[in-house]
């Protein structure tokens, strides 16, 4: 039986996908971890007829997701909903105070899950941990970012546990690989993954979500 897998989030998920009303098989997933997951599962299991949708939008905070949730998530009634969001909440909090710190992040995240579950109770939720890495020229910025991002990471894990969702831990994996091969190899500007960084996310996602697939 076909499963619909929906990816939601910010620029890391967006991946410069084409945003038109026309279905574009070549570009509708964008570039990034979600493209890799789509390609791998689609190639290895064509008989399962997976359907993939990407609705990540660059720059989005948790509140932005909530503002477009009915249109870009609930109405699709996904079998699997994967969410990666949080770093922009801290970025914009530091820049102009318009983001969400941990407590507000938690409240809005729970609303997102509740609305999806109210529509389709058996939707499986996948919560990906937001992450960052210090890189040359961005050390002070990432230090300030992580001060507030760590509590959001803790909330993301707590929300996953509370809702019996899959949690995909990413920060420690990036830390480990960065220590071996250099942070810039995986995340080029402190926030956005390189090609190899996206492969790392895809690997962890597939490992954590194996029982759903």
Image (cartoon, rainbow, N blue to C red):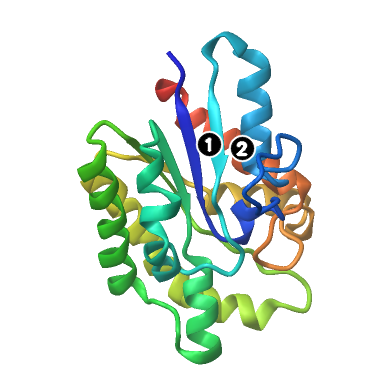
Residue 68 to residue 181: above or below: below
Instruction: Name the image quarter holding residue 140.
Output: bottom right
Q: Residue 45: percent from the left, percent from the top?
A: 59, 13
**54, 10: nearer the viewer:** 54
Q: Return the residue found at the far front.
A: 22
Crowding at dot 2, Cα within 10 Å, few <14 / some 14-19 / many 20+, comes out as: many
The residue shown at (58%, 46%) is 173
Q: Residue 128: percent from the left, percent from the top?
A: 46, 48
Verify CB contact (< 8 Å) between mark 2 and mark 1. yes
Q: Distance between the residues labelled 2 and 1?
A: 5 Å
Instruction: Name the image quarter holding residue 196.
Output: top right
Q: Return the residue found at the far bottom.
A: 96
Of helix, strand and loop, which one carries label 2? helix
Q: For this view, does 51 lie left or right of residue 191?
A: left
Instruction: Give the position of the N terminus as an image quadrant.
Output: top left
Q: Which mark is residue 202?
A: 2
The residue shown at (47%, 46%) is 169
The residue shown at (52%, 86%) is 94
Q: Which mark is residue 205?
A: 1
Q: For this view, does 112 lie left or right of residue 20?
A: left
């Amino acid at each position: 039986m076909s499963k619909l897998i929906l990816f939601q989030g910010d620029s890391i998920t967006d991946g410069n996908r084409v945003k038109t009303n026309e279905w574009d098989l070549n570009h509708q997933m964008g570039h990034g971890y979600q493209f890799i997951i789509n390609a791998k599962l689609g190639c290895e299991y064509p008989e399962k007829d997976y359907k993939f949708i990407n609705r990540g939008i660059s720059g989005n905070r948790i509140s932005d997701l909530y503002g477009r949730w009915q249109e870009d998530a609930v109405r699709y009634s996904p079998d699997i909903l994967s969410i990666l969001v949080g770093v922009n909440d801290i970025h914009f909090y530091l820049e102009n105070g318009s983001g969400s710190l941990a407590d507000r992040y938690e409240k809005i995240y729970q609303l997102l899950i509740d609305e999806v579950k109210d529509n389709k109770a058996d939707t499986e939720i996948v919560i990906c941990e937001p992450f960052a890495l210090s890189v040359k020229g961005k050390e002070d910025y990432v230090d300030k970012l992580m001060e507030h991002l760590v509590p959001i990471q803790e909330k993301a894990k707590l929300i996953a546990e509370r809702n019996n969702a899959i949690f995909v831990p990413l920060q420690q994996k990036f830390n480990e690989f960065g220590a071996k091969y250099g942070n810039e190899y995986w995340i080029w500007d402190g926030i956005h993954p390189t090609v190899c960084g996206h492969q790392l996310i895809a690997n962890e996602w597939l490992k954590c979500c194996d029982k759903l697939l």
